[in-house]
């Protein structure tokens, strides 16, 4: 086992964190570019948003495969294959000249981006001692957030400097560095036990999870919340790019710094759940997101930014509790249960523009806020159902 504060710990944690930053920077860097791409390709907001959502869609679908494949092939080997695929597809994105080519390579990239989220936590759980695991997971989640923020900031800055495709050159370099670090500093697995890939067993496990109300309700809560939260950023980008704001891509990218309050929401989630219970604490997070959404209706950039700071706190509060709930309440095949949560999570992200588009067409940003509040009302109801069902099944594990 790799012990906390050992040389192997710091080297492997560094490799995983750099890889995480590369993956989530690549996943999210297209979001602040959507208004620019809409102008360049002469496409509607809904059509151009597919260049972003197809990445999250393909990532979500790939998770169904990678977790099982890593059990059969080995963690490090599959991680290197997917990171290499991510790097190559990122380089190809720097050369595309049409929107169809852009969509194709974003889909390919999305399929490879799913490798790290499906494998990293499993590798850490097997190879790190418990003190090392707690610290490493904290580093890894922070790298996810920082990667998502920095990718958005970098893409906006590159668009303002010359051309939006320039961002893929530093991203390719970061991909190469992450491949080298994983190859050089991630130790070969010593605790890994290879199992044969059995499609029927994987399917059976997933169907079993979907039949468990304590899991299915949380899958829906996580997916539907992310459906709204992530895609609010997509539509506000078009608001900020238009009159009266007329913000550049780099300034639009700065809005994603509001994710930082999510770190505080995640950190406080356990304390809030200890007082209220997880279902009610999730409901508090959703109410905070409703408040944040309403605040954005105020005039001026400061109120818009304040609203997103508030929403990010509420979202990550709820998301952290939902993730923990799944791992604690899955009665078998815990890895596939957690992977299935991420499938719902990213499928929600991918379908959010389709859900919010009619509201956008009817009322622009005010319509988006209305659609958001309606969906958050649904997830509030799901939290109430989860609380009621939990009260009736007191013999199962409880996050209290």
Image (cartoon, helix red, strand yellow):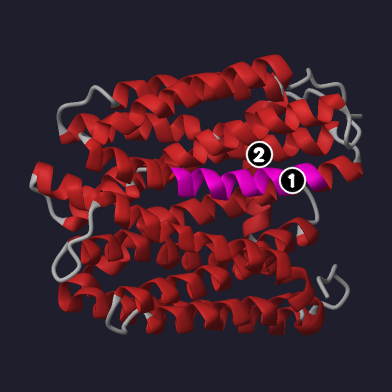
What kind of element bears circle 2?
Answer: helix
Foreground pick, 201 / 387: 387
Decide: few, some or many residues near mark 1? Use Cα within 10 Å; few <14, some 14-19, many ≥20. Answer: some
Give the residue drawn at x 36%, y 66%. 232
**Residue 21 placement, left or right of 251:** right
Residue 19 at x, y = what percent? 59, 31
Picture quarter with the C terminus: bottom right
Give the residue drawn at x 22%, y 67%. 239
Residue 221 at x, y = what percent? 56, 69
Q: Which residues are magenta?
A: 135-150
Q: In the rendered image, which residue does mark 1 sit on?
A: 137
Residue 147 at x, y = what percent? 52, 43
Mark 1–mark 2 Cα distance, whole angstroms, equals 25 Å
Residue 245 at x, y = what percent? 20, 67
Give the residue drawn at x 83%, y 25%. 8
Decide: few, some or many residues near mark 2? Use Cα within 10 Å; few <14, some 14-19, many ≥20. Answer: some
Foreground pick, 371 / 394: 371
Q: Is there any visible trace of residue 262 in the rendered image?
A: yes
Q: In the rendered image, which residue does mark 2 sit on?
A: 202
């Amino acid at each position: 086992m790799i012990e906390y504060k050992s040389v192997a710990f710091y080297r492997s944690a560094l490799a995983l964190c750099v890889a995480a930053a590369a993956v989530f920077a690549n996943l999210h860097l297209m979001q602040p570019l959507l208004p620019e791409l809409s102008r360049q390709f002469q496409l509607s907001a809904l059509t151009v948003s597919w260049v972003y959502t197809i990445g999250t869609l393909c990532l979500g679908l790939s998770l169904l495969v990678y977790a099982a494949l890593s059990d059969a092939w080995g963690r490090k080997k599959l991680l290197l294959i997917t990171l290499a695929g991510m790097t190559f597809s990122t380089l190809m994105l720097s050369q595309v000249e049409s929107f169809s080519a852009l969509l194709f390579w974003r889909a390919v990239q999305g399929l490879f981006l799913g490798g790290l989220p499906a494998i990293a936590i499993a590798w850490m759980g097997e190879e790190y001692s418990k003190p090392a695991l707690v610290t490493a997971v904290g580093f890894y989640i922070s790298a996810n957030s920082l990667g998502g923020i920095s990718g958005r900031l970098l893409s906006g800055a590159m668009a303002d400097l010359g051309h939006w495709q320039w961002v893929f050159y530093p991203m390719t370099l970061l991909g190469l560095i992450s491949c080298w670090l994983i190859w050089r500093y991630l130790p070969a697995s010593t605790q890994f036990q290879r199992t044969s890939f059995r499609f029927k067993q994987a399917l059976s496990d997933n169907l079993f999870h979907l039949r468990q109300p304590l899991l299915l309700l949380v899958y829906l809560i996580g997916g539907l919340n992310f459906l709204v939260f992530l895609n609010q950023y997509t539509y506000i980008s078009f608001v900020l790019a238009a009159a009266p704001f007329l913000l550049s891509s780099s300034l639009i990218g700065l809005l994603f710094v509001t994710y930082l309050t999510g770190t505080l929401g995640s950190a406080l989630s356990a304390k809030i759940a200890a007082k209220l219970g997880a279902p009610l604490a999730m409901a508090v997070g959703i109410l905070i997101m409703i408040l944040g959404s309403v605040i954005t209706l105020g005039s001026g950039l400061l109120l818009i930014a304040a609203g997103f700071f508030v929403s990010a706190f509420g979202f990550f509060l709820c998301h952290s509790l939902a993730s923990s709930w799944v791992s604690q309440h899955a009665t078998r095949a815990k890895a596939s249960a957690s992977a299935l949560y991420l499938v719902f999570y990213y499928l929600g992200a991918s379908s959010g523009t389709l859900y919010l588009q009619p509201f956008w067409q009817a009322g622009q940003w005010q319509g988006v806020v209305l659609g958001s509040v309606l969906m958050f009302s649904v997830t509030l109801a799901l939290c109430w159902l989860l609380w009621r069902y939990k009260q009736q099944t007191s013999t199962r594990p409880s996050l209290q």
